[in-house]
Amino acid sequence: MHPKSKSVLDFLLNEYLLNILGFGILILSIICNYSVYDEYKLANVFNSDSLGIPCLFKDIFYNGGHIKDWYLAAAPALFPDMTLYYVLFLIFKLNFLSLSFVYGLIQTLTIVVLSCYIFRKSFSANLKKYSWLVPVFYSILFLESYYFTNDQFFPSLMLVYCYHTGTLVNTLITVSVLISKIKPVYKFIFIFLFTILATYSDILFIVMFIGPTILTNLFLYKSKGLRYILVYTLTVIFGVCIAMKLYTHINQSGLFNFSSPNKMYAFENIGQSMKTFYAQASCYISLLGFRSFQMVFAYLSPVISGIMFLVYRKKFSESVKFFLLFYTIFSIIVYAAPVLNGSYTGWDTIRYNVAPVFFAMTFLAILVGYFMKKRESNRIFSFGLSYLILIVFFSLITFKLSPKGFVNYFSYYPQKVKEIDSVCVKKNFKRGISNYWIAKWITVFSKNNVQVLSVYPSCAINEVGSNIKWYLTGEFEFVIVDKLDPIEIKKNFIILDTINTPNFSILKVRKFYFAKNEYVPKTKF
């Protein structure tokens, strides 16, 4: 080969350049994901669950609310969710659409950077240079939002806060420290302290990190040594115990009010959970596309990883064996935990065990990288395959990218909220009630400061994700009927007028209020 041609190939195959291009593909895929949102998809992503933190921060930092009056989700999500949101809140203030985009970008990039680090630390120099494939393959997650099923809820799990993706971040941080070259004493101190923080933030950390690493060490007891295993196990278990004690003490002190976990240890519900999980997995796999490919690979890859460990364990280095074992055990435990706990109650419950589906893209990069390494002596082939992968992904993304759609995302104003705002302006309504799934959504997106609070179908207060004093202060003038029990409405309110819009039936009622320690509405006479 001519020296100049060789220099050009060396430059184009430089791993730093390929990593820059790989991350460029990933960032572009995220931007494209936001650019193709429509009314329905954004309403699914920005639902009452995901709007909890924006409401909390606005209330505390702008409206003079107090955290002790809030009824928070069962998982505090202190780190990284709340911490990162607070930092971005200082920058973006109440512009939560911009904040949400930047949050999703940072969270995704953090997961992918940590995945690359684990890849590079676990495998040899000849293979780790293919870590540029990791960000490229992670972009598969977002391709489904603009091809085939156009599902945007599934990729949104990577982007939003308080959907347990932060626990995957904490898991990858701790694994990165565990496999690093840091001195064991400092490593264990960090893991002990971080275990307290991560477990307090989300008990799912026990499922994602504590359990898998203890079992991985036990399988590698010959190389790790019983002393190492004992010290490590006691370190993380002690950290978990402190976190759980701290959580219980804070909850009982009244400083924070955490909701009870959904279906905790509901073993009688295992059969139904298995049916729900199977139905969702079967549906996702049967609808061919990028999502179905990702799901099939994510379910098969732990088996492949386990077989690789069993067959080649005598040839692999300790770091490779640790990765393969951890990946296998981590995937199996996280998939199984909500099912065996009886808490896989609906398709949205995939947020509890979607982490291995995301992390599976790291294992895919390892397999493809191994295939490319075997043929790297042919420089032309390496160049052709590397840039073919990059060009295919770049083309798939840019073909669907809508610059106008991306700009429109930042001024999102739901049509349904416009309807409510229009009625409230005409009727001079300021405060009302409705079901959990639309109440907070209307409040956040209203441009006329309309406040809609969440109630159960019985019209009793549903305080989860809300400040209880919102209910106890002031009067209410209207009821949005959606998903509320008509019998309970007639029983609790005096209806003065009915206003119908294309999407809602809104009742003007005699003014009512909620009394302290009484969860049912009372009409004002």
Image (cartoon, rainbow, N blue to C red):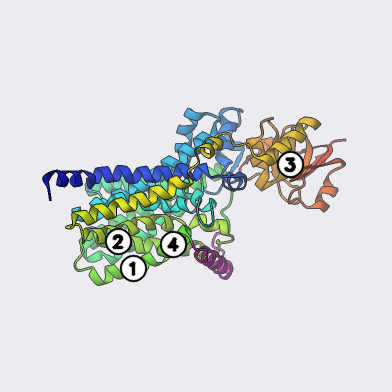
The image's mark for residue 304 is 1
Q: Quadrant of residue 229?
A: bottom left
Mark 4 lies on residue: 293
In this rendering, position of residue 497 left or right of residue 517: right
In this rendering, position of residue 167 left or right of residue 175: right
Name the residue: 40% across, 47% down.
196
**Numbered circles on residues, count:** 4
In the image, residue 61 above or below residue 501: above
The kind of residue tagged 3 is Ile
Looking at the image, is mark 3 or mark 2 nearer the viewer?
2
For the residues labelled 3 and 2, the Cα–Cα distance comes to: 53 Å
Queried whether the magenta region covers residue 494, the answer comes back as: no
Q: Secondary structure at mark 4?
A: helix
The kind of residue tagged 2 is Leu
Mark 3 lies on residue: 433
Relative depth, front residue between 94 and 240? 94
Q: Secondary structure at mark 1?
A: helix
Q: Please tell me which of labels 2 and 4 falls first in the chain.
A: 4
Name the residue: 84% across, 43% down.
493
Q: Which residues are magenta?
A: 264-288
The kind of residue tagged 4 is Phe
Name the residue: 56% across, 54% down.
261
